[in-house]
Each structure stands twice: as structure tokens, then as C-alpha cells.
Image (cartoon, rainbow, N blue to C red):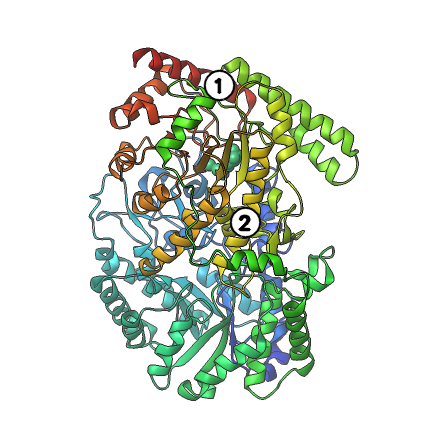
Amino acid sequence: LRFPISPSSPPPFTRLRLTSLRTMASHIVGYPRMGPKRELKFALESFWDGKSSAEDLQKVSKDLRSSIWKQMAEAGIKYIPSNTFSYYDQVLDTTAMIGAVPPRYGWKGGEIGFDVYFSMARGNASVPAMEMTKWFDTNYHYIVPELGPDVKFSYASHKAVDEYKEAKALGVDTVPVLVGPVSYLLLSKPAKGVDKNFSLLSLLDKIIPVYKQVVSDLKSAGATWIQFDEPKLVMDLEAHELKAFTLAYSELETSLFGLNVLIETYFADVPAEAYSVLTSLKGITGFGFDLVRGAKTIDLIKGGFPSGKYLFAGVVDGRNIWANDLAASLEVLHSIEGIVGKDKLVVSSSCSLLHTAVDLVNETKLDKEIKSWLAFAAQKVLEVNALAKELSGHKDQPFFSANATALASRKSSPRVTNQSVQIAAAALKGSDRRRPTTVSARLAAQQKKLNLPSLPTTTIGSFPQTMDLRRVRREYKAKKISEDDYVKAIKEEINKVVKIQEELDIDVLVHGEPERNDMVEYFGEQLSGFAFTANGWVQSYGSRCVKPPIIYGDVSRPKAMTVFWSSTAQSMTKRPMKGMLTGPVTILNWSFVRNDQPRHETCYQIALAIKDEVEDLEKAGINVIQIDEAALREGLPLRKLEHAFYLDWAVHSFRITNCGVQDTTQIHTHMCYSNFNDIILSIINMDADVITIENSRSDEKLLSVFREGVKYGAGIGPGVYDIHSPRIPSTEEIADRVRKMLAVLESHVLWVNPDCGLKTRKYDEVKPALSNMVAAAKLLRAEL
Ligand code: GLN
Ligand code: ZN
């Protein structure tokens, strides 16, 4: 990607002033691209819609980059990153850099432009997009490179050097950041048609020459430092994978000569073996570590750090929104200063600030006290710099005092601590809450009450959210319509959804979730201990951002949250109405979580609040309750060693929510993924009565996992059609799928339902699809 640098660039704004400040060693791993008010999102979407030109998009992007560099330079950051901006994703940028464009996009060589780039990212009229997957354990998603033995690599995007020059023209000398070659390959997958066991690392020889060209380009442009992000180093790697790092960097060594090279790791501690491989690499000047999530790395550093090398100490958390505990960070820094040497210690962020919100300044409505406890990316830059200044003997006393005051207020604030919640949650430690009876006994008791046909039909919860519906919610929130009018409108919507389901002859109904705009926010807003921001957006993928709630205090439920709507819905029908809740693990995993107590303690508190809700629903006569755990899997720690502990408390939290209900109350759960072969035992251990899962790829293997994986016994509803596509599946097609399921699952455990909620679909897609789904179920009942 090339963006022209206009010859009329503004005069260098910081060159002079910076020389004096630049003795302090501070560094930022990477910075959010979206802009403080999601400027990039809107520019991208308008460009994609054909409403603005490529130049407009480039202009917005250039202004964003310039303001970020300027902000860091003015703060006094010494090592300012460049090439951390992206029009979509930094891994895709790397794919473009090395020209690894899959043939289906018809790229003919030359510099890769927006056309090819966005086709890979989003697909085009004739070709689907490349696959996207989660970036480590963050909520960011990257575009997975597709590689094979025949890929021809070439230097096809000069974005890194262009950005470097762009910053330089503004008077800011930056550290260009590249995704390291080994992590890049380890994050790739074999292209379609390539042997699944193809060794991606065998391509190292072929991509290194392109990296060499990039490095030499950067050198000619005047770069003195270069940063390679190699986050894969924190994972469980095999010996040959570790060896690839040694090979890659010794291959690069000659071209790196004369440059300072930083290898950056993040998201966890570096395992001992990887640490020794990393710190033995030749030609490397500095090593970056996440000392927030990787506290164990500190012991490795204390055990030995190569002399004369720089340590980039990531002490300011890039994954959260909390103000740094500056005193505690100083303690860490002082404890390693002696080992590394004062002049070689660089204060840094724990990872790219991409994973936190952008700027607290825009949170004008946030409670003042809570606001004083927070730091978004812009504030984290100041924290890093203040720490670096302190280390070099220039303590900014007012800054440190303000930080100490804020931290003390957070510690002692009555809004954070709720004694009775603490006591109740503490009582759960070491306990094993679960329903006292087996799932088969419960299902029998439930069937007596519910009297469902075999292959019962249901949906996952939400029904289409029309513009009108969204407007009603918005106007109610803005107090433009009265509560009465709002309740009336929502009741009408529920009634409509109930009638549709009765007409379709669905067995277990839902109310359609018209009152919810988001499955976590809806509960967060009613629970205490949660705060919400106006602009605390974090990039999820491409132009998509999420705005996670902030859990700042002990969580409790002041009053029932869903009982009114669920019982209203139940009163409209004789059929069973599912109560619809979001589970504690999902609420936790989709929020910014407090860092002053372990995550599992916060999760237990949420579980207790949801438990109260479950029991209130039961009392109100709701016999089927679904507790969604859409995000349970995504909280799985990066390293295998830590899986068991996480799964243990996560699954226990789920069980806590429903351990108190009667046998006759049917507990459903829903999960938005199907690749849980590795956590199947934990899923079973959730002890739900019915579990609905995504199954859009019709993965029969998954079903056999269920069948083999201990005689599960509970009901299972693998989605029979994909709700992510507007396509309407035919009755025959659905019936075929169900037949395939019946080949591996017994008919009395099988449920028939879509993959997920229907909120993003239109009624003219949903009605015929569900009608075909019910027809298919009836067809098959006749065959049983
Ligand atoms: N009950 C939710 C819905 O239907 C579930 C959404 C999800 O799993 N992501 O919208
Ligand atoms: Zn789902």
C-alpha cells in the first residue's frame, strides 16, 4: 500500500524540543488505529460504500497517524512505533508486504493497492474473503495467511517504509514495526488444496529475502531501530519451532547490521526455553517482554539477561483500561535495573495499545471518581513516559501524587467493595456446586411437565431487530418517549414474535430479546459494579469495534432483570417460553475486568447475581431457562498448562447459576462455536440439560465427539442452518443435515434449532427459513 506524502507536509513540529527530552528511555509497542471517535471506521465504511474516494480515506488515515506520532513525541516517548497503523489488519499488511496474495484475488504483481487488499480482507462480488481468526486471546481478529509450497513471495507493499518516511517528514523518527517472520508463518495455515501437514516453517527461506529487502529499504530511509513482533514466543512451542527463530534471525543478521533490533513479545510470560533461545539470538539489540501478564518472565530476567542488551519492560497494561499502579511498576523496574543496567532499561507498554480504548478525554459523562481510576491508550503513553522520567531522575511529582490519590480512592471506595457479595463469593471457594440429580433423571421430570415432541424445535433467542425497534430503544434511552410508551412498544414486539412462532409451530418459544441491544451490556447496565463509556471502543476486526463495559466493583443484582419481560411473554402463550440470560463467563470475557482481584472471583460474583435471576425466573413460572455462554471458549488461556484451572472455575461459575433450580426446570446453554473437541469434557461438566451449538460447517466429527465423550445424555441442538448468511435453506437440505446428525446421535437427545440468534437477519429471511426448519423436523419425526 502506498500513500503519497505530499510535498507540502507541515514543518517538523517537534524536532528541536525533542532532543532534550529524548534521553529518557520509553517505548510504546503499538497504538490503536481507529481514532478517538472511530474516525477510521467511518472513513473505511464510507469508502467501501462508494461514498468517498480513496484519497478521502488516505487523508483521514494520514491525519490519524500524524496526530498519534505527534502526541507520543510531545509526551516525550523515545521509541515511537510506526507501521502499527493498518487499513484492516497488521497480519494482512504483512501478507501484502511479502506478496503472498492467494491466486483467487487475481493480483498481477506490482504494488498491492486497495482493490486487492480489501478483497482479501472482505471478499468481493465474486470471491469470498480470507479466513479471519482471533489474535491470541484478545478480541482482535486477524486475516489468516494461506500459504503453500508454490507461493511466490515478492516485496509488494512498501507500507512500512512509507510510514517511516511519513513520520520522518513530520519530524518524528520512529521505530518501524514488522510482524516477525516466524510468528507470521506460525499464524498462517496451509492454503486450500495444500497438504494439511505442510510445514509452514519450510517457507522461512523464501520469505526472509523479502524481509531483507524491507530492512534495507528502512535502513536507507534512515531508520536506526526496527521492531519485530514475535508474540508466538509466549506459546507452547515445539523444539523445531523454537529453532526457526534462531534460523530466521541468523539469516537476517547481516542485513540487520548497523541497525538496532528489538524483538517484542507479549500476552504472557516467555517460557524458559523460549527465553533462552530468544536472548541468545545474534544481532539483536533489545528484547521486549510483557511484565503484566508475564510476571514469571521477571524471574527469568533475574536469572540472567545478556549483557549490553536493552530490556523493553512492558509494565503498563495494554489489555486493560486501569490506571497503572506507578509505585508498583517502579518497584518492578528498580528490581531489574541492576541486572540490565540503567541505560539499557526501557519502560514500555505490555503489548500494543490496540487492545485498549483510545482516549479518556472524551469520556465527559463518566463518573469523576471512576474516571480517575482509568487510563486509556493516550493516558498510558503518559504513564510510560512518567515512569521513564522517574528512572532517569526526573520524577514528575504531581503526576505521581495524582496517581497515588486515584489508586487510594479506588482501594477504599465503598462503590468497589460490597461486603455481603465478598462473603457469598468467598464461600464458593473450594466448593463444587451442582444440581444433585443426573441429567437423565432431570430430563425425564422435565418431559412430564413440558410434554415436547421428539426432535423439539426452538430458536436461540433474538429475533430480527428492525430499524423501528432500534429507534424505540434509542428514544427511550434518550428519554424522548415515556416508560409506558416504551413498555407498550416492546410488548407489541414480543407479541408479534410469539404469534410468529406459534404460527410456525415451534415447540419452545423465545421472546425475541427486543429490549436488548447487546447481550452483555443489557445485564451490565442492571448490575451494580459496572460502568459504561461513551467512546471506549476497541477494534475487533476491520472496521468493527466493541465497547466493553468496565467491571470496577463487586457485582450484585439490585433487582430482577428479565423476569418482567419473560413472564409477560409467557403470559401470551401456552407453549413453554425460554427465559434468556447471558452467562457469567461470557459477561466476564466481554468486559474490561477489574485487576484488583483474580478474574475467577469476579466471575463467581457475576454467577451469584445470575443465580438470583435464574431462581426468580423459576418462581415466576418460567420452566425453561437458557444461559448463554457464547464466550466461554475464548477465555481459554494461551498456554495448555493453564487450561485446567480456567475451565474449572469457568464451568463451576456456570453451574453455580443453576444449581438451585428444581429438576423440572430445564436449563439450556448456547455456545457460538463448534470447535471444542479439546474442551468437550468441560462442556459436559457444565451439566446443562440442553446445549445448543454452532454447527454451520456440519461437522459430523463434532457430533461423534459428543457421542463418544462420555455418555452425555443431555439434549443437544447442533445448529441446522447458518444464520450468518441471508440464504434460505430448503426443507430437504435441513432434513438431510438432521439425518446426518441422527446417524451419530440418538433421536431422543436431538433438538432442531438454528446456529445462533436471528437478530442480524431480516424477517423475510427468518420466516421461510424457520418454516422449512419446522417442516424438516416434522418430516423426520414421521421417519423415526
Ligand atoms: N441469545 C442470544 C441471541 O440469540 C445469543 C447470541 C450469541 O450467542 N451470540 O442473540
Ligand atoms: Zn450464538
Q: Position of residue 200 (x, y in %)?
A: 25, 53
Which residue is nearer to you in this view: 446 or 690?
446
Q: Position of residue 574 (x, y in %)?
A: 56, 18
Q: Which residue is mark 2?
A: 608
Quadrant housing residue 377:
bottom right
**Residue under the image location 60 percent in, 62 percent down:** 376
Q: Residues within 10 Å of mark 2 (few under 14, many from 20)?
A: many
* Mark 2 or mark 1: whose residue is earlier in sequence: 1
Which residue is nearer to you in this view: 1 or 38?
38
Is residue 516 placed above or below 633 in the rendered structure? above
Q: Quadrant of the C terminus?
A: top left
Q: Position of residue 725 (x, y in %)?
A: 45, 29
Q: Amino acid under label 2?
A: Leu
Which residue is nearer to you in this view: 305 or 685?
685
Q: Is residue 735 visible?
A: yes
- In the image: residue 502, left or right of residue 287: right
